[in-house]
């Protein structure tokens, strides 16, 4: 059965300091809706999931495999599996991440 999910009515949880997320899961994907505090750091990490990062609001510095880039609202980045990446919110941000396969650790 198809279901309408009202994402902003879902409970938000702080996954790492300054990163507040709401999550929607299907069998094959996870959608993460992030509200990120200004200056919040994303430690370097890698995962087997493919990830599409879509910056909706704010400015974010993303470092992928040692190369830094400044993202603005409307920018989208495709991150391949197992590539180290980190980041920092330059301003308060809203980001939508889509992961495939689904992130069991975010359930």
Image (cartoon, rainbow, N blue to C red):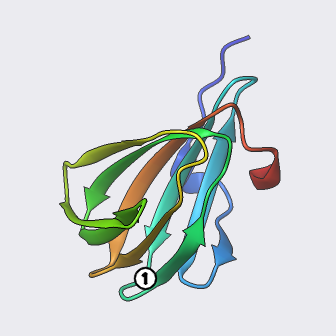
Question: Which quarter of the figure has residue 91?
Answer: bottom left
- Closest to the observer, 2 or 43: 43
Q: Secondary structure at mark 1?
A: loop
Q: Is residue 38 left or right of residue 80?
A: left
Numbered label tally: 1
From the top left corner, tell me how far across and down residue 83 is, in percent: 53, 50
Residue on which the image places disc 1:
37
- Closest to the observer, 4 or 15: 15
From the top left corner, tell me how far across and down residue 73 is, in percent: 19, 57
**Residue drawn at point x = 56 percent, y = 50 percent:** 32
- Closest to the observer, 26 or 72: 72
**Residue drawn at point x = 32 percent, y = 78 percent:** 92
From the top left corner, tell me how far across and down residue 82 is, in percent: 61, 47
- Closest to the observer, 104 or 70: 70
Please tell me whether residue 50 is drawn above or below residue 82 in the rendered image: above
Question: Which quarter of the figure has residue 36?
Answer: bottom left
**For the residue carrying disc 1, how many other residues have a C-alpha within 10 Å: few (<14), some (14-19), or many (20+)?**
some
Q: Quadrant of the N terminus?
A: top right
Please tell me whether residue 41 is drawn above or below residue 3 in the rendered image: below
**Residue drawn at point x = 24 percent, y = 69 percent:** 58
Please tell me whether residue 84 is drawn above or below residue 87 in the rendered image: above
Please tell me whether residue 12 is drawn above or below residue 95 in the rendered image: below
Q: Is residue 19 left or right of residue 72?
A: right
Residue with the most extreme bottom position:
39
From the top left corner, tell me how far across and down residue 27 is, in percent: 76, 23
Residue with the most extreme top position:
1
């Amino acid at each position: 059965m198809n279901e309408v999910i009202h994402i902003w009515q879902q409970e938000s949880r702080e996954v790492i300091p300054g990163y507040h997320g709401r999550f929607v899961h299907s069998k094959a994907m996870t959608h993460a809706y992030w509200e990120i505090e200004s200056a919040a750091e994303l430690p370097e990490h890698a995962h087997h999931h493919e990830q599409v990062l879509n910056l909706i609001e704010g400015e974010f510095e993303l470092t992928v495999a040692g190369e830094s880039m400044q993202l603005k609202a409307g920018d989208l980045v495709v991150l391949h599996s197992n590539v180290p990446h980190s980041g920092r919110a330059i301003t308060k941000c809203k980001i939508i991440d889509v992961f495939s396969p689904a992130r069991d650790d975010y359930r």
